[in-house]
Amino acid sequence: MKLIQSFSVDHRLIVPGIFFSREDTVGGGTVTTYDVRLKRPNREPVIDVAAMHSLEHLIATYLRNDPCWKDEIVYWGPMGCLTGFYLIMKGSRTPQDVYYLVLNAFKSVNDAQEVPGTLPENCGNYLMHNLQMAKWYADEFVRYLEENKDKPEIFEYPRTERLVTDDGRQFFDS
């Protein structure tokens, strides 16, 4: 089987940021998937599960209520590796185009007094939330994005360059 796009990025080199992951045509329109990465994969602790769940609820609610963007949001959800989230939007934009949307979504977490949708009838695991830790992770990411907003590495996936021999074989270094 062919390796999917998100597995072809060298995770040893990813830093926190907002990355273009893929673009697809769905029902005659374009949808774009962004990798919103809060943690360096395999190099720092992942996001606490309860905090991740709270961030999912808080930011999904923010995005789907933002007056300028709500009609463009298709999906907001956590990565299985617990290092970030996927944002899927209608249309085709660069990560820089959605920077302030993501930044403001994470800033909004600090103002939350409760996590929306945490009643048993609203959530499949309504007891697994941690608002205080969600605020901590959100604040950490906001500071990081603001401090690094002019650095291209927070918007461009790192690529490992591999030498290709004359007969087409790839050279993998140790």
Image (cartoon, rainbow, N blue to C red):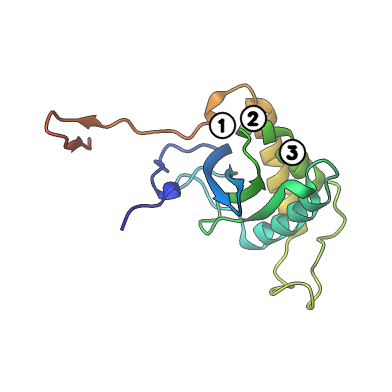
Within 10 Å of disc 1 (Cα), the crowding (few <14, some 14-19, many 20+) is many
Mark 2 to mark 1: distance in Å? 7 Å
Left or right, 114 with reference to 143: right
| Amino acid at the residue labelled 1 | Phe
> Which residue is depicted at the point 67% across and 46% down?
90
Which numbered circle lies on residue 43? none
From this viewpoint, which residue is outermost toward the front? 28
Which numbered circle lies on residue 101? 3
Measured as percent of width and height from the top left, residue 122 is found at 78, 73
Secondary structure of the residue carrying tag 1 is: loop
Mark 3 to mark 1: distance in Å? 14 Å
From this viewpoint, which residue is outermost toward the bottom? 121
Which numbered circle lies on residue 96? 2
From the image, tell me which residue sits under label 1: 155
Within 10 Å of disc 3 (Cα), the crowding (few <14, some 14-19, many 20+) is some
Measured as percent of width and height from the top left, residue 145 is found at 66, 32
| Amino acid at the residue labelled 3 | Leu
